[in-house]
Amino acid sequence: MILVTVGTHPQGFERLVRAADELAARLEEEMVIQYGSSSYLPRFAARSFDFTSSEEMKRLMKQARIIISHAAAGTIITALLLEKPLILVPRSKKYKESLDDHQIQLTSILHDENRAIKILDPQIETLSNAIRIIPELSIQPRKPNSLLFYIRQKLIDWEKR
């Protein structure tokens, strides 16, 4: 199963939801899409929903073979801890999907470390190609000084503010 998640942002993420849904029509593998606040409602995914509990999302992430997601730190950390391959499609200020481009920066770091595949323009072809090259990713856990440890520590520091 391929899980697509866009998080709980109040801004929609139609670009990713639409491309993933169109790809779902062509795949033989089951695709589950969490579309959040997006106005586009999936028609071809095996299952779709707007929001769910964190417990249900973690259950879906555990079941997934691949996770396609916006570049939210919580989703990234959970996927890395579960050792799931990640395809990241960062939200963009340019398309009014985010207030800034911090997701692009985080995605670039993970892509450069071969921890995720970065897609800036989600289309059927780009998502399909990313799924095809997933086996090339390095998803094994790393030492405590890894990016995962760094992100987790930054989140802890941020929550203390």
Image (cartoon, rainbow, N blue to C red):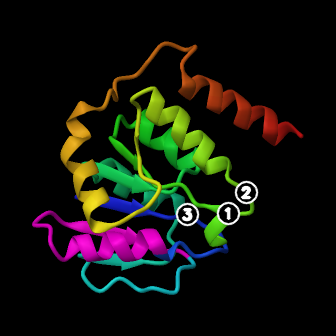
Pair 1/3: label in front: 1
Who comes first in sequence, dot 3 or dot 2? 3
Q: Is residue 145 left or right of residue 138?
A: right
Q: Nearer the viewer, residue 63 or 97?
A: 97
- Where residue 74 appears, as percent x and y from the top left, is 58, 47
- Choose between 119 and 137: the one closer to the eye: 119
| Residue 40 among those drawn in magenta | no
Q: Which residue is mark 1?
A: 93
Callout 2 touching callout 1 (CB < 8 Å): yes
State the extent of the magenta-drawn residues as a range: 15-36
Q: Residue 106, image x and y in percent? A: 59, 40
**Residue furthest left in the image:** 28
SS for dot 2: loop
| Residue 148 placement: quadrant | top right
In this rendering, the answer to whether 145 lies above or below 15 is: above
Q: Helix or strand or loop: what does disc 1 sit on?
A: helix
List x then y, in percent, for residue 1: 22, 58
Q: What is the x, y in percent for residue 85?
A: 33, 41
Q: Earlier in the sequence, mark 1 or mark 3?
A: 3
Q: Nearer the viewer, mark 3 or mark 2?
A: 2
* Residue under pointer 2: 100
On screen, residue 56 above or below 132: below
Q: In percent of the image, x 38 and y 77: which residue is there?
A: 18
Tag 3 residue:
7
Q: CA distance from mark 1 to mark 3?
A: 16 Å
Quadrant for residue 19, please give it: bottom left
Q: Residues within 10 Å of mark 1 (few under 14, many from 20)?
A: some
Specify which label sits upstream in the sequence, 2 or 1.
1
SS at badge 3: loop
The residue sitting at the right extreme is 161
Report, in whole angstroms, how far the alpha carbon at label 3 lies from the one at label 2.
16 Å
